[in-house]
Image (cartoon, rainbow, N blue to C red):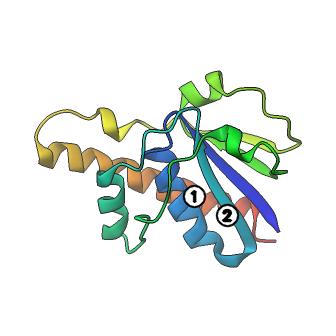
Amino acid sequence: MKKVLVLCTGNSCRSQLAEGFLRYFAGDIAEIYSAGIETHGVNPKAIQVMKESGIDISGHTSNNVNEYASIDFDYVITVCDNAKESCPYFPTKAAKLHYNFPDPAKATGSEEEIMKEFRKVREMIRVYSSKFVKDNLIH
C-alpha cells in the first residue's frame, strides 16, 4: 500500500485539507498522513469548509514532520513554499511533489471574505488531490 505525506508549515489548514481530500479520493488504496514543520492545531475554518464538502476532518491532529521519520513514504507533497524550503532533511526515496497553495489563514476582511478564501483554496486542493490520486495511486 502506498504511503503519502502532505507537508505544510503548521499542519493547520492546507495540509489538513489535502489529507482530507486525499483520504476521500484514495479510499483504502493508500495511507495518507499530514504534518508540519511546526504544529499549530487544526484550523476551525478548515474543518468547517471540509464539512461543507461532506468530509469530516474534525478528528485530525496537527503533527510534526519528525513524528513520521521512521515511515517509508512513497510520495511527499509540500503544499507551501515555506515547507519546501524549510523542511528538515527527510531521508526517503519518496517522489517529491510541490504545489504552493495560498494560505487561507492569512486572509483578511470580513468573515464572509475570509470564508470565501478558505473555499477557494479548498477547491484548488480538491482538484489537485483528485488528479494526484488518479495520476499516482490508481493503476
Residue drawn 50% across the image and 43% down it: 11
Locate the N terminus and report the quarter of the image it occupies.
Answer: bottom right
Q: Is residue 123 above or below residue 113?
A: below
Are the residues at dot 1 and dot 2 in contact (C-beta closer than 8 Å)?
A: yes
Asked which quadrant contains residue 58, the reply is: bottom left
- The answer to whether 46 appears left or right of 63 in the picture is left
Q: Position of residue 20 (x, y in %)?
A: 51, 63
Quadrant housing the C terminus = bottom right
Residue 102 location in percent, x, y? 41, 36
Is 54 left or right of 138, judged from the image as shown? Answer: left
Estimate the x, y position of residue 57 in percent, counting from the top left.
44, 64
Say which residue appears at 80% left-offset and 51% top-offset. 73
Q: Which residue is mark 2?
A: 133
Mark carried by residue 129: 1
Q: Is residue 119 visible?
A: no
Q: Left or right: where does residue 1 sit relative to residue 103?
A: right
Amino acid type of the residue tagged 2 in the rendering: Val
Using the image as rendered, state which of residue 90 and residue 101 is in the foreground: 90
Is 40 or 87 nearer to us in this picture?
40
* Kind of residue at badge 1: Ser
Where residue 26 sits, quadrant-wise, is: bottom right
Density class for disc 2 (Cα within 10 Å; few <14, some 14-19, many ≥20) is: many
Give the CA distance from mark 1 to mark 2: 6 Å
Residue 61 disc label? none
For the point 55% across and 53% down, the residue is 128
Name which residue lies at 32% across and 38% down. Answer: 105
Question: At numbered mark 2, what does the secondary structure look like: helix, strand or loop?
Answer: helix
Residue 24 at least partly seen: yes
